[in-house]
Amino acid sequence: MLHNHRFQLRVKSPILSSMTQNLRTILSLPLLALASFCIANQAAAFDPRAEPEGATSAALENSSQSKVIRARHHMVVSANPHASEAGRAILRRGGTAIDAAIAVQMVLNLVEPQSSGIGGGAFLLHWSEQTRKLTSFDGRETAPLAAKPTRFMKNGKPMKFRDAVPGGLSVGTPGVLKMLEKIHKRHGRLPWAQLFDPAIKLAMRGFALSSRLHALLQKADVHSFGPKAQAYFFDKMGDPKPVGTLLKNPAFAQTLSGIARNGSDYFYRGPLAKQIAKTVQTSHANKGDMTSTDLATYKALERDPICISYRTYNICGMGPPSSGMLTIAQVLKIIEPLDLGSTPLNQTALHLISEAEKLAYADRKRYMADHDFIEIPQGLLDARYLAKRRALIKPHKTMGKAKPGTPPAGKKRSGIDATTENNGTSHISIIDVQGNAISMTSSIEGAFGARLMVSGFLLNNELTDFSFRPTDKQDRLIANRVEPLKRPRSSMAPTMVFDRHGRLHMVVGSPGGSRIILYVLKTIIGHINWGQNARSLTHMPNFGSRNGPLELEKVPECK
Ligand code: GLU
């Protein structure tokens, strides 16, 4: 994670791997991915037969030199080397991409507990090489049955974001485990129980508290954490435990053993579900209303992915309740006919791209939310509508703040949304030896979620991704308002890029709150328009506009 103090721009570079999925190609040509550890805390694990001489995954993590990693057989890219290694071990045992993703997610939950885990939600794209089918899965949290549109209003005013985060009020019913189990039933090869072994062993053995986790704890207010989380992360004086502390988590090992033996029912039904509900209802701050029934009735969903053509590629991503791919698709279709030049980050291109982003973010705020509850206009990707939007971009002048448009069949009167969005999250990209791949973005929302710990894992604060106000100043209902069982709008954007022959070309995704969309766009445009490879894309500073100022990342020098 990087901080740009000048622009107050909080960014993480996309975790990106560039892959080709044709089996014969895999065997004869290397897969290509980048590990750039001075930019982001990412880790790639790969088959050592293709490893550069003398290098190991662990050495790469500590290296100040970014390297292009090539693998012949399979590849895992995640935010932590323990997690990537766990995925690699599963792939070497003959596991599929989803088998590996489960092992990676469980280890991430342990070693990067602030970002994602079974107490949170996720979106996943799955590419099956055998059937040549792309599927997307929604494991997003839901609002409890008891939730009301005024959930985050106090005395007629929206709560302050930071006041709403800690405690049970912000916790949505978690979806990660249900989603992974659903996909494993369809695409897994190794037995479910085996996939939990690496995380269980590491939780018992202990792992060294990383400098990144430590730095995030230093920025957090110890008093915002519930007692169990405080005891796990902080010492008796209330200071974060030092870097390198051996953290053991037997409670999490026990939770995972139960899930390994009994499936997701261990989590969603029975004593653990009761414990989760009780923790939410009796929390130290902002008591919540999630019940065991909310947990027992949670459903992970299969959704249709959204795919668009862009130049000679097809780009596919996650549809609502994520705004990720719809917004990315609007921007790409708006800029597609424009001349962005061939030099990366040229001034004309930065202007055109950020103006297109303003237009798309304006539509996102008005129209995008959980489409099981509200109607999202079909016309958001209509070519004539987007041509009209494109015409609003002037070559030498900014439009200032963009207004939402009126797409065909668009509801003109939905409210203007003021949802605040945080930064947290993790992204996992995996390809297995058969060429099946996953792109999974997983989150407990902000760093440390609701700051509540149950049985060794943290609960999310994903409900703060809803609009705190149910109506805008003109009393129009806001699409992303809280409603019972609704999923908060997300920006998560797990993405896959296919070439003109329908072959998987690139797997992309990123953490970063509402900036995820900008990061993924930079990566796609940088590759397709400017011909940049994975290595230079990871080094390329992030840029873009979320319908505010043009944000530019100041890239610190690698030490
Ligand atoms: N909760 C955010 C979302 O779903 C993700 C937070 C982040 O990426 O940092 O869009």
Image: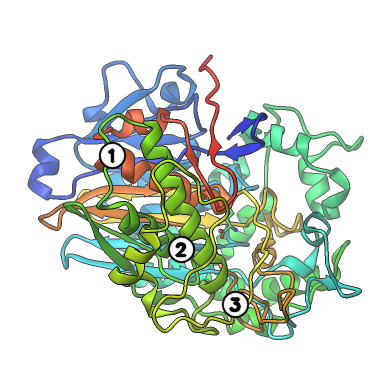
Work out whether residue 173 or residue 192 is closer to the camera in this orientation and state it.
173
- In whole angstroms, how far apart are the C-alphas of marks 3 and 1? 34 Å
In x, y percent, where is residue 333? 31, 59
Graded by Cα atoms within 10 Å as few (under 14), some (14 to 19) or many (20 or more), the crowding at tag 3 reads many
Kindly indicate whether the residue at mark 3 contacts the one at mark 2 (C-beta within 8 angstroms): no
Work out whether residue 193 or residue 281 is closer to the camera in this orientation and state it.
281
Instruction: Tell me the kind of residue under disc 2.
Output: Phe
Q: Which residue is at 46% across, 75% downward?
A: 406
Earlier-in-chain disc, 2 versus 1: 2
Q: Which mark is residue 229?
A: none
Q: Quadrant of residue 437?
A: bottom left
203 shown above or below 498: above
Earlier-in-chain disc, 3 versus 1: 3
In x, y percent, where is residue 128? 23, 63
31 shown above or below 168: above
The nearer-to-camera label among 2 and 1 is 1
Relative side of 349 to 62, left or right:
left
Q: Which mark is residue 123?
A: 2
Which residue is tagged 3?
A: 479
Which residue is tagged 1?
A: 527
Q: Could you tell me which quadrant the N terminus lies in?
A: top right
